[in-house]
Image (spheres, rainbow, N blue to C red):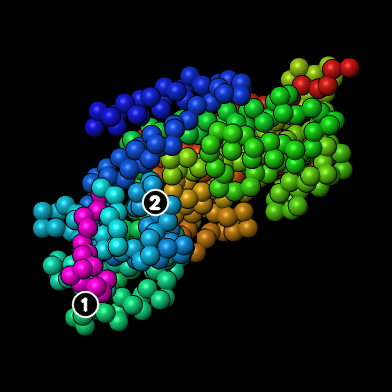
C-alpha cells in the first residue's frame, strides 16, 4: 500500500510540475515498470471494491469471460495483468459471488494470470480446460452465469461464437438454463471509475491539454508555411516521444473568412493536408491519448493572429463563449437515473430556447475512447440514440463532453461551428472537468516581417 501511494504521489507531482513547459524533456510520465505496478494495483482495487457492488446489485452469481489469444474480448483486456499484451491460448476468467458478498476471482488458464486471480486449473490432473471450468461451476452452484453478449454495446459482446459453442457443449445440462447476459455488470465495470483512477485521470487530461497547447503554438506552426497535416503528424510524433499512444489519428482543420464550406462529417472536418495555415484562420484539433489504460478525447480551437493583432477578434471570442454556454446548458441537465436520450432532449430544448444552435454527441470515456455506458446523442442522431441512449446515467463515470454550436459570423458572411470536447467526471456533485475547459482561444503569432 505504501509503495502504491508513493507511486501515485510521484506521478501526480511529476506531471503537475512538468506539463506547463514546452521543452523537449519537460513532460514526464512513469517508466514502464512503474506503469505496470500502477495498473496492477488499480486492477486489484477495482476487483476488490467495485466488482462486488456490481455483481450484488445485478444479482449475477458468476461471470465467465472467455478469450483466445489475438481475438481478445474488450473486457478481458481490462482484466489482464499489465505485462500481458494479449490473452494466452484460451484464457478463462471467472468471478463468483460468495455467501459473504465478496467475490472469488479465478483463472482457468495454462499460465498464472497475475496476482488477482487464483489459478483454478491443473492441466496434469484435468487435461480438459472446459471440464476444469465445470468443476469450478459445481463448486459455487450459481443460479446465474453471465457471459459477454450484448446487442447494443460491442464492448460487452466479446464472447465469440466458437468459445460459446465450446462452453455450451461441455456445460452440464442443469446449468445451460442459467446462462444470462452479463451486459449490466460488464458495462458497469467498464464505465465506473474508482477514486484512485479519477485522481490520476486529472493529470492524464492535463498532459493531453499541454500537448495541444504545444501543437497550437509557434513552436510547431509557422503561418503561411505549416499545413494542417504537418500539425497532425507532429502530434503523432510528440506522443511517441513521450512513450504514449493515441487511440485515433488526430485531425486538424481550418475555418476561415474565405469562401470555404465546413460541415461536420465533411472532408474538411477530418483534416486536409493541402491546407496551409494562414493568418486569420480559426483552427480546430481533435486529439486523444491512451495512458495507464485510460483515454482522453479533446477538441479545442486556436486563432492565427494577423499582423498587428494581439488578440482574436471579438466575434470569434464571443463564438467560443457560445460553445461554453452550450456546455453549461448540457452538463446542467445531468442527473443520476436519467437516460442519455432524456438529457439530450432536455438540453437541446433549453439551448434552442436560449438562441443557440446545438449539436450534441457526447460519449462515455475510460478504458475505451468511445466507451461503454450512456450515449448522449450522435452528430447525425439528434433525436436520440436507441439502445445505449436509453441507458441511465450512473455516478462516478467519465464522459467526453462533445458538442458544437453553429453561429453566423457577419464579418465572414458565413456560419461556423465552435466544436468543443472536454473530458469530465459525473459524480454526486454533478459534472466537473478533469482539467478545466477551454474558455479562451489559443493564439498563434504571425510571421515577423
Q: Residues within 10 Å of mark 2 (few under 14, many from 20)?
A: few
- Helix, strand or loop at label 1? It is helix
Which mark is on residue 175? 1
Q: Earlier in the sequence, mark 2 or mark 1?
A: 2
Q: Is residue 5 magenta?
A: no
**Label 2, label 1: how many angstroms apart (C-alpha)?**
31 Å
Could one spot residue 350 in this view of the protein? Answer: no
Q: Is residue 373 above or below residue 322?
A: below
Location of residue 180 by image quarter? bottom left
Image position of 24 (left or right of 371): right
Q: Which residues are magenta?
A: 116-129
Could one spot residue 444 in this view of the protein? Answer: yes
Specify the quadrant that holds the C terminus. top right
Residue 23 location, x and y as percent? Answer: 61, 21
Residue projecting furthest to the left? 99
Residue placed under numbered mark 2 in the picture: 84
Amino acid at each position: 500500500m505504501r509503495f502504491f501511494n508513493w507511486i501515485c504521489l510521484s506521478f501526480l507531482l511529476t506531471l503537475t510540475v512538468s506539463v506547463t513547459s514546452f521543452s523537449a524533456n519537460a513532460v514526464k510520465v512513469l517508466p514502464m515498470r512503474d506503469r505496470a505496478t500502477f495498473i496492477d494495483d488499480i486492477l486489484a482495487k477495482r476487483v476488490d471494491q467495485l466488482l462486488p457492488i456490481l455483481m450484488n446489485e445485478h444479482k449475477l452469481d458468476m461471470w465467465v469471460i472467455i478469450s483466445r489469444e489475438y481475438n481478445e474480448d474488450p473486457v478481458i483486456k481490462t482484466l489482464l495483468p499489465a505485462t500481458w499484451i494479449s490473452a494466452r491460448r484460451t484464457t478463462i476468467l471467472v468471478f463468483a459471488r460468495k455467501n459473504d458478498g465478496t467475490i472469488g476471482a479465478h483463472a482457468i488458464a495454462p499460465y498464472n494470470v497475475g496476482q488477482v486471480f487464483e489459478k483454478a486449473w491443473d492441466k496434469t490432473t484435468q487435461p480438459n480446460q472446459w471440464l476444469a471450468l465445470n468443476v469450478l461451476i459445481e463448486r459455487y452452484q450459481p443460479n446465474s452465469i453471465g457471459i459477454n453478449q450484448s446487442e447494443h454495446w460491442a464492448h460487452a459482446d466479446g464472447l465469440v461464437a466458437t468459445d460459446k459453442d465450446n462452453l455450451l457443449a461441455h456445460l452440464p445440462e442443469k446449468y445451460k438454463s442459467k446462462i444470462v447476459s452479463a451486459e449490466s455488470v460488464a458495462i458497469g465495470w467498464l464505465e465506473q471509475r474508482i477514486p484512485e483512477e479519477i485522481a490520476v485521470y486529472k493529470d492524464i487530461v492535463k498532459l493531453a491539454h499541454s500537448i495541444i497547447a504545444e501543437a497550437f503554438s509557434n513552436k510547431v506552426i509557422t503561418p503561411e508555411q505549416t499545413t494542417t497535416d504537418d500539425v497532425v503528424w507532429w502530434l503523432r510524433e510528440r506522443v511517441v516521444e513521450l512513450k504514449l499512444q493515441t487511440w485515433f489519428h488526430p485531425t486538424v482543420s481550418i475555418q476561415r473568412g474565405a469562401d470555404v464550406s465546413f460541415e461536420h462529417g465533411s472532408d474538411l472536418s477530418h483534416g486536409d493536408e493541402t491546407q496551409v495555415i494562414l493568418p486569420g484562420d480559426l483552427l480546430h484539433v481533435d486529439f486523444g491519448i491512451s495512458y495507464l489504460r485510460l483515454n482522453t478525447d479533446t477538441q479545442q480551437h486556436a486563432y492565427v493572429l494577423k499582423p498587428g493583432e494581439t488578440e482574436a477578434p471579438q466575434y470569434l471570442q464571443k463564438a467560443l463563449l457560445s460553445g461554453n454556454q452550450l456546455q453549461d446548458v448540457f452538463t446542467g441537465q445531468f442527473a443520476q437515473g436519467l437516460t442519455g436520450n432524456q438529457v439530450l432532449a432536455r438540453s437541446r430544448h433549453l439551448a434552442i430556447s436560449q438562441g443557440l444552435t446545438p449539436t450534441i454527441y457526447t460519449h462515455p470515456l475510460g478504458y475505451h475512447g468511445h466507451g461503454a455506458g450512456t450515449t448522449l446523442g450522435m452528430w447525425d442522431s439528434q433525436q436520440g440514440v436507441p439502445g445505449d441512449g436509453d441507458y441511465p446515467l450512473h455516478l462516478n463515470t467519465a464522459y467526453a463532453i462533445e458538442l458544437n454550436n453553429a453561429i453566423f459570423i457577419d464579418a465572414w458572411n458565413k456560419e461556423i461551428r465552435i466544436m468543443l470536447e472536454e473530458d469530465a467526471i459525473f459524480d454526486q456533485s454533478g459534472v466537473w472537468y478533469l482539467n478545466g475547459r477551454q474558455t479562451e482561444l489559443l493564439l498563434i503569432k504571425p510571421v515577423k516581417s
